[in-house]
Image (spheres, grey):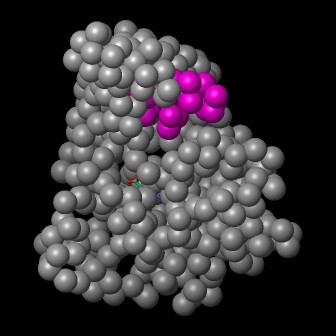
Amino acid sequence: MTNSENSEASDFVVTPWEVSGKIDYKRLIQKFGTQPINDELLERIKKHTGDLHHMLRRNIFFTHRDMNWILDEYEKGNPFYLYTGRGPSGQVHLGHTVTWEFTRWLQEKFDVPLLFQITNDEKFLFSDKFDKVSDLDQVTRENILDIIALGFDSKNTKIMIDTDNAKTLYNAALPIAKKITFSTVKASFGFTNSNNIGEIFYTAIQAVPAILESIWEGRNVPCLIPHAIDQDPHFRVARDVLPKIGYYKPASIQNSFFPGLSGEDGKMSSSRAETAIYMNDTPKQVKKKVNKYAFSGGQATIEEHRKLGGDPSVDIAFQWLYQFFEPNDDKIKKLEEDYRSGALLSGEMKAYLIEKVNAFLKIHQERKEKVKDNIEDYLISD
Ligand code: TRP
């Protein structure tokens, strides 16, 4: 790497444990070596799904590894299963649900099983917040309710909690761990000699669900992992190692980050709570946060806005609608045009968003209440 590349590369950081700075996704793709999702692939997916999720049409899911292989196998009658996960470190917010909403769509369209890993071990090892593993129990349960409430079908969805499924995970992780050196882990995750040894081992645990269906079935089953792009280093390691012990490389499809209300620093994060919307937030809280914190692409006064128009590309209310809450292409186009022309004001854009977010959360919170006693239907036991 030349010096200029080096200094260029340092203005944003994307690792599984840190996302910061203004992310240049083009450069990230180059750095990680994933494949951009092009029109040809979209057409191929559409052949099977009938329509395209707006997160595909709008490039929110923007890169992949081996999607064409997944579809080749599917077309040959060798269907894949889905694997995704959640590190339960705190309350679920809207940013987390981007990947899961899309995963649910894939599951429904392809009618395939989903394995959902809850990595309480990871959060224990990587965070200073927890003294005992059991400190995560409450939040783990809450998070699982949020996941189930998004509508995953219990007949086709299994959830594993790492420490509860330790026997399965540890047995399968051993041959994986044996093929990963400390220098690989250092290079892949930027670890140093002061990382704890649990952190060093952990990536083997996150690789396991990519082969579990194969272990259970006694034959190799293709695995597709939808995930936010920051998790890619784990699966790069997994793709390197798993063929060495007789399994397929897992395929993946990656989304960009959902921004926080302030629009700063890459992604929505609980470390800036006021700029995140949580699944438990009340309509009042949503309204207050959006009105107060959503970065506006509008002009300073109404007169100026009417004259000059706003900039939807930096307006967070518009961005949230575009990325998540307004799947209708005609409507989103009109919002964009009216905002640019000045016909639509920032306050009006925010009001529209608030309505959408609150409608979404209302359904979510009702479903969450209903599935309270259904957790057991999803959990796998060792
Ligand atoms: N490490 C992820 C997190 O911190 C959790 C996770 C485990 C995951 N397995 C995954 C995420 C597979 C996406 C896909 O949230």
- Please state if 199 lies on the left or on the right of 36 as rendered: left
| Residue at the image position 52 percent from the left and 56 percent from the top | 62
Q: Is residue 195 magenta?
A: no
Residue pushed farthest right? 77
Is residue 115 among what the camera can see? yes
Q: Nearer the viewer, residue 33 or 108?
A: 33
| Residue at the image position 40 percent from the left and 18 percent from the top | 342
Name the magenta segment's main secondary structure. Answer: helix
Q: Nearer the viewer, residue 84 or 106?
A: 106
- Please state if 147 lies on the left or on the right of 340 as rendered: right
Q: Is residue 323 magenta?
A: yes
- Please state if 144 lies on the left or on the right of 15 as rendered: right
Q: Quick check: 353 above or below 63?
A: above
Residue 314: x percent and y percent? 33, 35
Residue 313: x percent and y percent? 38, 37
Residue 138: x percent and y percent? 38, 35
Q: Which residues are magenta?
A: 315-335
- Please state if 16 lies on the left or on the right of 59 as rendered: left
Q: Quick check: 232 above or below 119?
A: below
Residue 377: x percent and y percent? 67, 40
| Residue at the image position 66 percent from the left and 53 percent from the top | 114
Q: In which of the image's four quarters is ligand 1 placed?
A: bottom left
